[in-house]
Image (tube, helix red, strand yellow):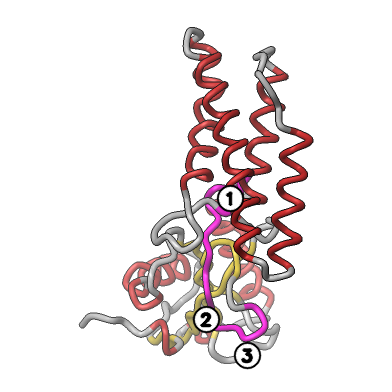
Amino acid sequence: MGEEKLVALIQESLNVATRAGAAKPSDFTKVIVDTTLQPKAVAFPTDAKLMHRARELLVRLAKKHAVGLRQSYARVGKRALMTYQRYAHAKQFRRANRALRSVRTYLGRVLRDIVRKTRADANLRRTFAAPLSLAFRVREQRQNQRGRKVYSLHAPEVECIGKGKAHRPYEFGVKVSVATTLNRSKGGQFIAHVKTLPGNPHDGHTLETVIPQIETQIGASSLASSPTAAIAGTTRRPTTR
C-alpha cells in the first residue's frame, strides 16, 4: 500500500469517525505512543540456509541468461546443508562448522565463476550486479558480527529486533511506531498515527520526529484540537533533554 496511502487512509477514517459521532475531537488530545515490530514473511535465517539459497538463485539466474558454469553444486550443496543441519541439531558443532565451510566454499566458487564469465559483457554485469553484491555479503558475514547483516535474500531490508519477549527473543522485520487514543471513544479506540522506523533506532530517539507528525496528521484530519499530551512506554522516554 505504501506509507502515503496509509496516512491518507488513517486521516479519512478519523474524519469519518468524527462526522459519524463515533469519536469526539477532544478524544485525540491525549494519545499513547509505542513501538512494535512488523514481521516479514521470512524463514528463520541461518548462515547455511542463506548461502545455500544464494547459490541456488545465482545458478538459476545464470541458466536463464545462458551463462555456462563449471559446476552448479546442486547435489553436493544440498548434501552439505543437510549435514550441517543434522550436526547442529545434535550439538556436534565442530562437525557442523566443517559442513558450513563446505557450503561457503560452494557459494564462493559459483561467485568467482560468474564474475569471470560476465566480465566481458556490460549487460550481464548489470544483470548480475545486485545478486552478486547480496551473495558476497551473505558469504562474508559471520554469526556474531556487529552491524548490518542480511537476514533474507528477497527482503534485504529485514532487521533482527529483540523486544524482550520470553517466547520470541528475536524477531525479523521492521520497527513501527503506533499512536492510539488514550481513552476509549464511543466507536472504540482509534489509531492516530503509524510510521515505519527503518534502521532499528532507539525508542527514545524517535519521539522528537514522531510527535510533530502526529500533530500534523491529526490537524489535517479536520479535528478541532491537536494532541496536548503523549504517553510513552518506559523504553520510549527521551534519552536526551
Image coordinates of residue 7 in percent, x first then y, are: 54, 59
Q: Residues within 10 Å of mark 2 (few under 14, many from 20)?
A: some
Tag 3–tag 1 contact (CB < 8 Å): no
Q: Mark 2 points at which residue?
A: 25
Asked which secondary structure carries label 2, the reply is helix
Work out whether residue 101 or residue 113 is closer to the camera in this orientation and state it: 101
- Choose the circle earlier in sequence order: 2 or 3: 2
Q: Mark 1 points at which residue?
A: 2
Asked which secondary structure carries label 1, the reply is loop
Q: Name the residue under label 3.
A: 184
Type of amino acid at the residue the image marks with label 3? Arg
Q: Is residue 39 magenta?
A: no
* Dominant secondary structure (helix, strand or loop) of the stretch shown in magenta: loop
Residue drawn at point x = 52 percent, y = 81 percent: 25
Work out whether residue 51 or residue 9 is closer to the camera in this orientation and state it: 51
Q: Nearer the viewer, mark 2 or mark 3?
A: 3
Cα distance between the residues tagged 2 and 1: 27 Å
Type of amino acid at the residue the image marks with label 1? Gly
Part of the protein shown in magenta: 151-168
Work out whether residue 127 or residue 95 is closer to the camera in this orientation and state it: 95
